[in-house]
Amino acid sequence: MPRVADLPPGWRHFSVAQKIEHLIGLDRCYEILSWQWAGLDPLRRSMQLQVMRIMFSICMKAALDGTLERDAARERNRQRVLDQLDRAFKAARKPDAAAQP
């Protein structure tokens, strides 16, 4: 885990995915977690355990303080909100288009 001085400004406001991405990268994290436990050398096994520990602590903190649930709800409602904005934008433009010759 980086020292506090090494973290970017606004670190506390990052989403769970952004924190994991900043620390080790999501692609690298997925790769490390996909390694088969049997047959790993001690260094790789230690690395896999560290990734699990970091992800577990970040995700549990997010789950307990509610940010994970808010992010999931925001993602679920995203398409509905975009559709509403699209309808409102089209409705606002219709009178302008009819007024011009």
Image (tube, rainbow, N blue to C red):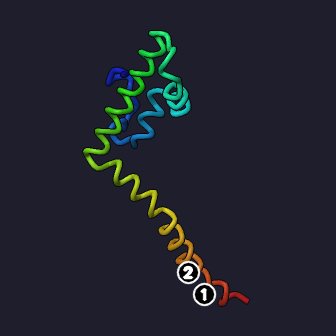
Instruction: Name the spot of residue 14 as percent of width and height, x first.
Output: 39, 41
Q: CA distance from mark 2 to mark 1?
A: 7 Å
Q: Is 97 in front, or is 33?
A: 33
On screen, 78 above or below 55? below
Q: Residue at x 44, y 38 (%)?
A: 18
Q: Which residue is mark 2?
A: 92
Q: Residue at x 55, y 28 (%)?
A: 31
Q: Residue at x 48, y 62 (%)?
A: 78
| Local SS, label 1 | helix
The extreme left residue here reads 64
Which quarter of the image is occupied by the C terminus?
bottom right
In the image, taking residue 64 as reference, residue 84 lies left or right, namely: right
Assess disc 2: are there few (<14), some (14-19) or many (≥20) residues with their C-alpha within 10 Å of its C-alpha: few
Labels 2 & 1 near each other (Cβ < 8 A): yes
The extreme top residue here reads 42
Q: Which residue is mark 1?
A: 95
In the image, taking residue 81 as reference, residue 98 lies left or right, namely: right
Which quarter of the image is occupied by the N terminus?
top left
Image quadrant assignment for residue 98 = bottom right
Instruction: Name the spot of residue 94 as percent of width and height, x first.
Output: 62, 84
Image quadrant assignment for residue 12 = top left
Q: Amino acid at mark 2?
A: Ala
Q: Is 45 in front, or is 79?
A: 45
Instruction: Name the spot of residue 19 as percent of width and height, x first.
Output: 41, 35
Image quadrant assignment for residue 93 = bottom right
Q: Amino acid at mark 1?
A: Pro
Q: Residue at x 55, y 77 (%)?
A: 87
| Local SS, label 2 | helix
The extreme right residue here reads 101
On screen, 43 above or below 31? above
Instruction: Name the spot of residue 81 as percent of width and height, x first.
Output: 48, 68
